[in-house]
Image (cartoon, grey):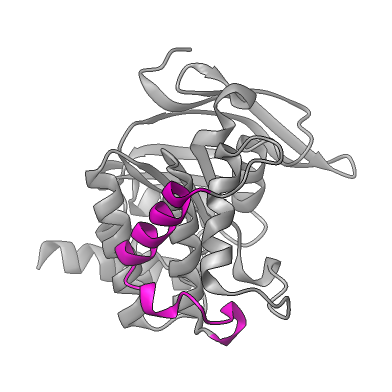
Amino acid sequence: MNNNFAIEVNNLTVSYSKKPALKGIDLKIPHGKIVGIIGPNGAGKSTLIKGMLGLIPLDSGEIKVFGKSLKENFPRISYIPQRESFDWDFPVVVQDVVMMGRYPHLKLFQKISDEDKAKVKAALQKVDMLEYAERQIRLLSGGQQQRIFIARALAQESDILFLDEPFVGIDAATETTIFAIMRKLKSEGKTILVVHHDLGRVTDYFDLVILINQRLIAYGKTSEKFNRDNLIKTYGGRLTILDKTEQLRSQTIN
């Protein structure tokens, strides 16, 4: 393993109550790519990113981040879990949420500096949410909340972002806005991994695609790996999936 890759995963295996959730996953994620993680419900998509982040116990596996151990480079990673994971009743304003991204850079008992405040402001400006800085985050729409958590990752100055179902519960226009932010981050050299469920947008959104169903079905360039055969292997040949695949194919041809 070396730092030619943003993330390297070797033989990642996870079980819940002795039931296998993921089996022997091997991945090499290059720098500066947007990577989609695709699979049916219960396939282990969220488990994969939690395992890569060291948030759950592994049966086996080695994770390297820029050629070093996960622990050494963990501050270079941001994780945005599913929105349902948050306590939206907690009374906190937008700028305080984004400021949390600066905490990994602060020493024990170190005060927030003017530089930290400036980075928070810049992050909010990047996601076009500066005017909401004093607003309670629970009062924002779902799409606005997602933009705030992306801003938190920007304030952290992360090089790798993990997003778990970021487009769930938001409208199409907001989804387009969030993806535009992701593209901008990619242009700045960030690596972004996204758990995603809408097969109709995969070819538009992702440079690389990971297809999993407890094991790795396929991984590589979306143009090469996101195809009918791999979707059948991943989803078990469900008719609705095949219908969407045909639509994707016709869109590509047209």
Kindly identify the residue that appears in the image at 33 percent across and 32 percent down.
31
Q: Give the residue furthest to the right.
A: 17
59 to 92, vertically: above or below? above
Residue 225 magenta: no
The residue stretch that appears in magenta? 113-139
Q: Position of residue 54 (x, y in %)?
A: 69, 35
**Magenta-highlighted stretch: main secondary structure?**
helix
> Would residue 3 be seen by someone viewing this image from the given angle?
yes
Does residue 205 appear left or right of residue 86 in this picture?
left
Q: Nearer the viewer, residue 212 or 63?
A: 63
Does residue 208 appear left or right of residue 249 in this picture?
right
Q: Give the residue furthest to the left.
A: 254
Residue 121 magenta: yes
Q: Position of residue 214 (x, y in %)?
A: 64, 44
> Would residue 166 be seen by someone viewing this image from the given angle?
no
Quarter residue 219 falls in: top left
Q: Nearer the viewer, residue 164 or 236?
A: 164
Does residue 247 appear left or right of residue 48 in this picture?
left
Kindly identify the residue that appears in the image at 31 percent across and 52 percent down.
206
